[in-house]
Amino acid sequence: MRLETCYYCSSTIWPGHGIQFVRNDCKIFRFCRSRCHRAFKKKWNPRKSRWTKAHRKFTGKDLATDPTFEFEKRRNEPVKYNRELWQNTLQAMERVEEVRTKRERHHIMKRLRQGTFDRKAADLREVRDYIHLVRAPNATKPMEEIEMVQKAIAKREEAGKLLTKVGTTVATTKKLNALRRRAPNIHVIIETSDTEQMIAEDVE
Amino acid sequence: MNILGKLLPTTIDFITYRSFSMTVPLYHLQKVSRVHVVDNSKLALDGNVYKRMPRIIHCYKKNNNLTRTRLTAGLGDKVLLAIKGQMKKAIIVGCQQRIRKPNVPQFDKNNVVLIDDDGNPIGTRILAPIPAFFRTRGDLAKIAAIATTFV
């Protein structure tokens, strides 16, 4: 029994599965399922079908060239049976698989990690391009502006406290609540985030 | 239907009657099937380029049932071919039909190997791959002997 690989998608073909097609030039094509067989009959290039391993290797999404793949090449020379050789080979197979999967995963992570940097750069670009929706672009001294607003709020809070001490009426409490309701909007901006600091640095 | 047509010509005109039965296509090799000879005998080489492709004109297939044979042939069956104006026996060595047995592949063309009346192949080599079960069947051993590759 031998586990073959599908010509089209490169998955393993288990016994009892798939179709074998023999061309008159003695080339054998094995397919794991009818999807692959039909694609082959339609003369589709496996390198262009996005779900095949051939495509993934061709476009560099999966590890393509690596010394660990050399171990799996088919050798057409018969080897005399040797028990020690068998045992060593089995051990070697396990180790090679370990190394190979590690390298494949590393290759993919390396590829995907680039995405986090790209996304961060895109976010910064977005903030820079659309900051005018948040605050005036020509505001030259944002930190001073923020301090002014903070002072104004502090004043209002003090005024509110005084009012409560004396004895407030319903009308004044309503005004106070209205002021307090407006305050939170400004609070959020005061907590400078990374992007705001960067912009402040950028402007200064 | 003809009577109806005569009675009501105007209404029947646009109704088409199709009365043929649809059976599943069999893809066996049978009489008049065109075939590709994979020998290296002279007759095979000439026959493949002759004005008419080699064709099966009779299938020697024993049917154990009492019903009439359908005269179809598959892998490993003996047939009578018409090659280059002559009649020659041959054994089918590759089918385009998808045979649902394990480890039996389907081939590119319907391959055939010429044999004489005793069952000995005429050529000395077979150029196309042969299914592996030819090695185990006694009556096909002579063909397996001159084969180069097995599938």
Image (cartoon, grey):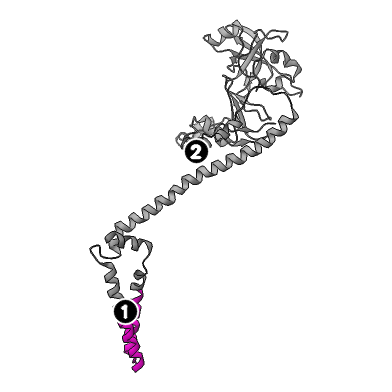
**Which segment did they paint magenta?**
A155-184
Eye-nearest disc, 2 or 1: 1
Q: Is residue A197 left or right of residue B30?
A: left
**Looking at the rendering, which quadrant does residue A200 occupy?**
bottom left
Q: Is residue B90 left or right of residue B53?
A: right
- Where does residue B4 sit, x and y in percent of width and height? 52, 34
The secondary structure that dominates the magenta segment is helix
Q: Tell me which residue sits at (29%, 56%) in the image.
A: A129
Q: Mark 2 belongs to which amino acid? A: Arg
A171 part of magenta stretch: yes
**Looking at the rendering, which quadrant does residue B23 occupy?**
top right
A20 part of magenta stretch: no
The chain holding disc 1 is A
Q: Tell me which residue sits at (35%, 80%) in the image.
A: A180
Which residue position holds label 2?
A: A56
- Where does residue B100 sit, x and y in percent of width and height? 66, 30
Q: Of residues A106 and B52, which is closer to you in this image?
A: A106
Q: Quadrant of the N terminus of chain B?
A: top right
* Residue A153, numbered circle: 1
**10 Å crowding of disc 2: few (<14), some (14-19), many (20+):** some
Q: Of residues A127 and B39, which is closer to you in this image?
A: A127
Q: Mark 1 belongs to which amino acid? A: Ile
* Residue B46, numbered circle: none
Q: Of residues A21 and A90, which is closer to you in this image?
A: A90
Q: Does A155 appear above or below A187?
A: below
Q: Is residue B28 left or right of residue A184?
A: right
